[in-house]
Image (cartoon, grey):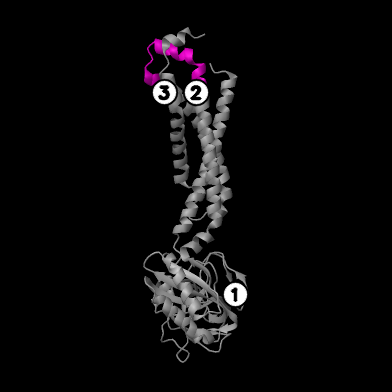
Amino acid sequence: MRTPAARLRSAIMASQVAVACVLLIGAGLLGRSFQALINVDRGYDPSNLATARLPLPPGATFAANAAMLETIKERIRALPGVTHSAFGNALPLVSAGGMTGLNVRLPRDPGTIAKIQALHRTVDPDYFGAMGLRLRAGRLLSDRDTASSQPVLVVNKSFADQYLGEDPIGRRLALSLYRHAEWEIVGIVEDMKQGGLQTGGFVPWTATADTAQPEMFSSYRQFGEMRLESIFFLARTDGAPSPLVPSIRTVVREQAPALVLDSVMTMEERVMQSLSRPRAYALVVGVMAAFALAIACVGLFGVLSYSVAQRTREIGVRTALGARTADIVSLVVRSGLTIVAAGVTGGLAAGALLVQSLSKILYGVRPFDPLTFAVVPVFLVLAAAAACAAPARRAARIDPLRALRTE
């Protein structure tokens, strides 16, 4: 018959296991969410892509700096290992470029003209190849799109779906803030996830969400009058882009000695930097869960060791009466796993109540994720079994004669 003290020890141990279970569930959900954020399709390819920002003098325009930008781009393209190089006034996770207002006839109600705003990027035609943006229909911007040719736009999927209807290629839009009366839609590209960035331009510093936004792309040759605060250079390589950074700095220093290149990073580094908060959540809860699990396992080991010491005479009697080694091991392990089962049951119930509070910070995984709720109990049972191994082995080695002589 178990004493009140033994029942109290078991209750405390079950509570520790329950706490470890709740924290492991939270760590599992946050870890899977973080992995989903890393692997999400962003619409572009961040691997092997070096990026840098070049602040420009006040009042700078594309037209005034075109020769310098083209020379820097071509020299970067000539560096060993570089497959694409480009520049533009926007970069995911950093700047969306600007906002442009325009009037469009809604596809579901052609009689209605809606005034809308969309993100507007002005880029070098090679921007799409450097970013790894996927073309869905039509064509991309090209070197043939100049100041003297028909002004054209490439839009993203969200823009086409919301504003252009079934046959977007060839449609013309009026951009009210610019001198060209109509701009022709020549291509559609995949949406790019922007993260938590800011946009500057005609609507200054408007925060955007990570959801897809309607976007337009125009060639800098057709938007030469656009004023710039800074420009972004891109260089896609056939290997790791980090060794390329000193060469890019050298090129810029030689071509524009009065300007200073800053924010030189790979796109993967920018992605990981943008995920610093979910990574911190997953790391903190993971560390807490590891400590809780360690405390639970050490506590279980201590409780079972003390129990074996207290029941030495009983175990000796069982052995003397014919109990096998496996029976003694089973006795101790069963005692430990009973505590663990109670703790896991309570932990799963508490976890089911608490995980709903994580729903706002989870991505790509449900709060009641079946895999997480299945793996955590199995992991806890295995860890508990390992903690039970030493006390069970010690109990199996008890000498019945010596145990029976013990008072």
Q: Residue 131 appears at what percent x and percent y?
A: 43, 71
Query: In the rendered structure, which segment of residues is drawn in magenta?
Result: 305-328
Determine whether the residue tagged by mark 2 lies in a helix, strand or loop. Answer: helix
Q: Which residue is mark 2?
A: 305
Numbered badge on residue 209: none
Q: Image point 54% across, 72% down: which residue? A: 96
Was residue 308 drawn as part of the magenta stretch in this picture? yes
Residue 29 located left or right of residue 143? right
227 in relation to 264, above or below: below
Inspect the image, locate mark 1, and give the three-letter code of the amino acid beneath it.
Gly
Tag in front: 1 or 3: 3
Q: Which mark is residue 393?
A: 3
Who comes first in sequence, dot 3 or dot 2?
2
Neighbours of disc 2 within 10 Å: few (<14), some (14-19), many (20+): some
Q: Which residue is mark 1?
A: 200
- Residue 279, given in percent of the width and then of the height, sits at 52, 53
